[in-house]
Amino acid sequence: GREQIGPQSFVLRGFALADTDALLHGVDTVTAQSPWRHMQTPGGYTMSVALTNCGEWGWTTDAHGYRYARIDPLTGQPWPDLPAAFERLAQAAAQEAGFAGFTPDACLVNRYEPGARLSLHQDKNERDFDAPIVSVSLGMPALFLFGGDDRADKAARVPLFHGDVVVWGGVDRLRYHGVLPVKDAPHPRLGSQRINFTLRKAG
Ligand code: MD3
Ligand code: FE
């Protein structure tokens, strides 16, 4: 089922469930090479969300700003390859939401422990706003905030569960969004964590 949350945004409930093993294996392969880390924001805060990346480009933040880079600043090495299971799932999900031919070159992997949150923001560091973003949620549930084109616009709350995939694109691509503090409700497979990864075209 396709649940429409914006003119060009869709929740595909359980779309990733059948691929859970392959996706979690992919996350383990990625974090073995580029470990989870808590990055600093330009404003001097430490993010409550831990992150890593895979694919050609990785999103990073430090005292100097937000940007995409080919080299992991922690390891000094290129980011790990995009697992094939990530790319296949992203392409299939994008197609389902009306974005044919999606070829991601970046994947930001976020890990939320209880209490971790993501304040309202726009994703503007990618070069290509025509490409959609595909997001995959695993582990503990979260309440996703889906706002408008202005920070002050009222945000809808969308619950996201293990296995849900969301596709955002077109006129919805620059909408403000965030994640409320994640409650501790241990997941049978992942324990007290939520993992979300987003596939993008950044370069
Ligand atoms: C809506 N991550 O990494 S994914 C992010 O659950 C991020 O970890 C959240 O926001 C998470 O930047 C939400 C969904 C998402 C990603 C990008 C979007 C929603 C979006 C871009 C535009 C509109
Ligand atoms: Fe975002």
Image (tube, rainbow, N blue to C red):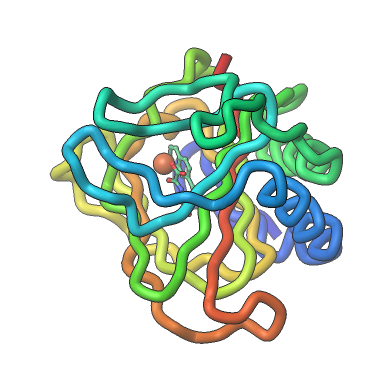
Tell me: residue 175, above or below residue 126: below
120 relative to 96 in the view: left or right: left
Q: Quadrant of the C terminus?
A: top right
Q: Nearer the viewer, residue 8 or 54?
A: 54
171 relative to 201 in the view: left or right: left
Residue 151 is situated, as x and y percent measured from the top left of the image, at 18, 40
Q: Quadrant of residue 28 in the image?
A: bottom right
- Which residue lies at the image location 75% right of the left edge and 35% below the top edge? 82
- On the question of residue 32 being in view, the answer is yes
Residue 64 is situated, as x and y percent measured from the top left of the image, at 26, 23
Tell me: residue 35, above or below residue 132: below
- On the question of residue 145 being in view, the answer is no
Q: Quadrant of the N terminus?
A: bottom right
Tell me: residue 183, above or below residue 167: below
- Which residue lies at the image location 84% right of the left edge and 59% below the top edge? 19
Q: Nearer the viewer, residue 47 or 146?
A: 47
Q: Nearer the viewer, residue 180 or 9?
A: 180
**Ligand 2 located in image quadrant:** top left
Q: Residue furthest left?
A: 152
- Which residue lies at the image location 72% right of the left edge and 34% below the top edge? 80
- How many numbered tags mark residues here? 0
- Which residue lies at the image location 25% right of the left edge and 30% below the top edge? 63
Residue 74 is situated, as x and y percent measured from the top left of the image, at 51, 36
Tell me: residue 67, above or below residue 11: above
Residue 34 is situated, as x and y percent measured from the top left of the image, at 63, 42
